Amino acid sequence: MSSRRERIQFLKAGVSKAERALRDAYEAAGFTDDLVHGLRHTLRVVDEALRIIRECGLGDVMACKLLCAVWLHDIGRVNAGNEQHALVSARKTLEVLGLCHGISNEDVSDIHFAVLNHSQGLEGVATLFGKELAPASTDAEILLGFLVLCDHADGASPEGIARLCEYRLQMGGNDFLPVASPRYTVLTLRRLLQSPNGIPLAEMKAMKEDSVVAHVLYNYGATARILAPMEPHITATYQKEWSDRLRLTYGLIVTFLDGCPD
């Protein structure tokens, strides 16, 4: 049984291993990257994690587990092929942390759980890919919440809109709306924005590949839902900062849709 000091030392070594594993994966792939999900995305998520650690006063153990999860959450995107990237990332997480001497099975399990579920958010945990999954600990659920907040910080922002637009233009797509049916997309997004029950994530998931605005709005809706259960674990200052960010993004989307013809 390791002491708390040793536990933190082992986890810090794990953070370094996780960072090295991600950088090595991109180097081996020729540093292929994109504006939406790639090494630069992970670096921005790391910045958000450091902000959470600082502003919410996370303890050393949770801080290290969060950084491990952040560095590894999208490692599966490097060479995922047609496989769901979260599954690949979770498998890589076990490989990387399994090589780290001293990290407990419980800590590895918490990090693995967060990485495996980060694309689903807190709502999709119970039935991920048709399998019943329960968090191994309360810390695992809290860790997942922090990871999803960090991840969405890069998508639910005005800067996220610009990056998505640039990415879609590079891929030959429209900047905001799909070419096939912009009128349908505008009407649907307006209806979702006006929904008294908030933004139904199932509908947003179905649309987000089809429209930059829908993709950003999906990030917006997912993050707004996560803030509530995470409230006991984040400071009022951080929650206000997030709410201000979301409000700004929401305003930009509404302004854009108001200028679109029906």
Image (spheres, rainbow, N blue to C red):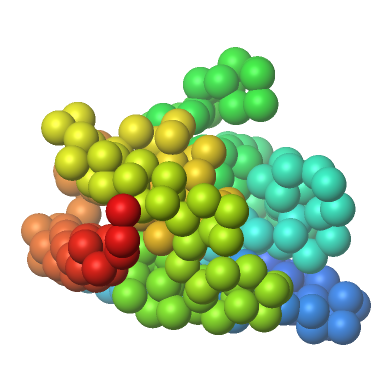
Is residue 69 visible in the rendered structure shown here? no
Q: Eyeballing the image, is 179 above or below 34?
A: above
Residue 48 position within the rendered picture, expressed as x and y whole percent measured from the top left: 38, 71
Q: Eyeballing the image, is 202 above or below 246?
A: above
Q: Is residue 2 left or right of residue 93?
A: left
Q: Which image quarter: residue 257?
A: bottom left
Which of the pair 191/166 is nearer the observer? 191
Is residue 21 visible in the rendered structure shown here? yes
Which of the pair 29/157 is nearer the observer? 157
Q: Which image quarter: residue 253?
A: bottom left
Q: Is residue 72 left or right of residue 21?
A: left
Please state the total of marks drawn on the protein image: 0
Which of the pair 180/136 is nearer the observer? 180
Which residue: 25% across, 68% down? 259
Residue 35 position within the rendered picture, expressed as x and y whole percent measured from the top left: 60, 77
Which residue: 66% across, 26% down? 129
